[in-house]
Image (cartoon, rainbow, N blue to C red):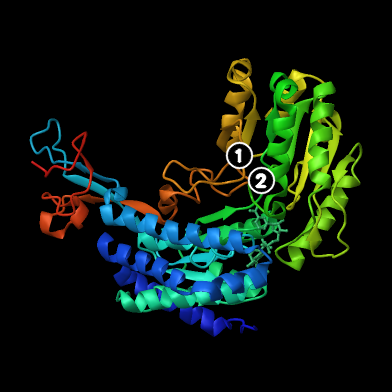
Amino acid sequence: MEFKDATLPEIEAAVREAHVAFLSYKNLNGKKKGEFLRAIADEIEALGNSLIQTAMQETNLPEARVVSERGRTTGHCRMFAQLVEEGSWVDARIDSAQPHRVPAPRPDLRKMLVPLGPVVVFGAANFPLAYSTAGGDTASALAAGCSVIVKAHPAHAGTSELVASAIRKAMIQTGMPQGVFQHLHGAGFEAGQALVKHPLAKAVGFTGSLTGGRALFDLANQRPEPIPVFAEMSSINPVYLLPESLAKNFEKTALLLANSVTQGVGQFCTNPGLMIAVDNDDLKKYIKRLGEEIIKTPAGTMLHQGIANNYHKRMAESLAQKGVSIEAQATDAGNNRQGRATVVSVSAKDFLKNPLLAEEVFGPFSLIVKCADVNELNLLAARQHGQLTSSIIGEEAEIEKFQSLLNLLREKAGRLIINGVPTGVEVVPSQNHGGPYPSTTDSRFTAVGTDAIKRFVRPVAFQNFPNSLLPSELKNENPLNVFRLIDGNWTRDQVK
Ligand code: NAP
């Protein structure tokens, strides 16, 4: 189905409506926002099979994946509902007045988090549900009390339209201010850029390419009033294969990594695009076993032609670099929208001399870097760019000998994994899905888990406010029963 691109006047109207809606939505209590988020989840489920079929047809993802992504989407809507219904996330702090303090009296100071304003969300190509119209960015922004303007990804515009219809129904059912959620199409950069530049837009959520994310980040920073852009962009998620463990477990490790590299035709931001190990006979055995698995993986249809073209182009570039050789490659299905699994290798010396090899090849592709010794492996780690994840495969006793590596990786990645692969992102409060540039534009925040809400809020302090004028969370009597830091103690008590 064809969807009409939003015109500039339509974009202007959408942002204005989102701004007006924000002015009342921001004051709704957690119970009301929770009802809205739960209704969104219910209405997405009520779309039933038509949503699943549309997403499958637009993205070529298999049914099981789309069904599980729908579960993840409704799951995070309900998770944020629970968070805001409970209410303590606003991080309320109260420091009571000390009128008799010498040499100067202390005023009454109270602080909490408040929403930023209208948030522009770009649907992601690789998650038509969980990172798109009602994805983690939208759900966390709505939970925070922000209105949202979604720019649908053209690769799954029909899926996006269906989810938008569910959100609109939920708005009506729960009496939300009209305009709190806006949905626009635009198969070109104009719509997205106009949204980011709009003076009433206050933040941006994005998942996609480094080029796209960086362009939008720069645009937002060139505005007369710069705004934050939370862009998740490019990560090759290095996996460090420690020598003793590889000697013992080369087979098990090869199966684990082969599955992770090829899962979902490699179209995950957490795909392990880099494996780093000391070059020896155990590594040869590992590569042989990994290759056997890679070769037998059927080529899969990629999400859209642009992603497939990009995969083929980036892989060809990588293969043309000095010292790079193919270790294993699945059969070419002869269809240019398919991505065949490929594992290549290069020496650490050639890798270190060639920055292009450290760039993401988005798809079922991984580069093995062969190090002369452990020192070279450590040097490679020191030269890594920021990543969403870094993994170490090794037994506890062996990893203890690599304390400096572990210490270094903490500076490089947002999630450190021992004896596991980066794919498979749990949606729980302790998750961190973010990392230093270029994996994201702001490593201080996560895009997954309850803390994702913190991207779309800012602190406000209220000094010497009479009790009647304070927000409920900061009133003396604690009517919402939230946890608060009162004069140094975390408590649900009233102010004495
Ligand atoms: P993309 O090209 O970055 O596009 C994502 C969204 O941002 C689209 O809606 C696009 O608009 C918009 N956009 C991109 N650049 C823009 C600009 N300069 N100004 C305004 N809007 C802009 O990503 P994609 O289409 O999803 O996939 C392309 C490549 O991105 C992939 O091949 C892959 O390399 C990478 N990617 C990475 C991840 C990851 O998690 N690391 C995820 C998905 C994709 P239009 O659609 O209108 O062009």
Judge by depth and name the residue closer to the eye, 4 or 468: 4
Crowd tier of the residue under label 1, counting other residues whose Cα lies within 10 Å: few below 14, some 14–19, many 20 or above: many
Residue 494, which numbered label? none
Which of disc 2 and disc 1 is earlier in sequence? 2
Ligand 1's quadrant: bottom right
Give the labeled residue for mark 1.
Answer: 389
Give SS at disc 1: strand
In the image, the residue with mark 2 has its CB under 8 Å from the nearest atom of ligand 1: yes
Q: Say what amino acid the circle numbered 2 marks.
A: Ser
Q: Say what amino acid the circle numbered 1 marks.
A: Thr
Give the labeled residue for mark 2.
Answer: 235
Percent of width and height locating residue 350: 86, 33
Q: Quadrant of the N terminus?
A: bottom right
Relative side of 24 to 316, left or right: left
Q: Is residue 127 visible?
A: no
Residue at 20% across, 45% down: 109
Q: CA–CA distance between discs 1 and 2? A: 8 Å
In the image, the residue with mark 1 has its CB under 8 Å from the nearest atom of ligand 1: no
Give SS at disc 2: loop
Judge by depth and name the residue closer to the eye, 496 or 153: 153
Q: Are marks 1 and 2 in contact (CB under 8 Å)?
A: yes
Q: Can residue 62 be seen in this view?
A: yes
Crowd tier of the residue under label 2, counting other residues whose Cα lies within 10 Å: few below 14, some 14–19, many 20 or above: many
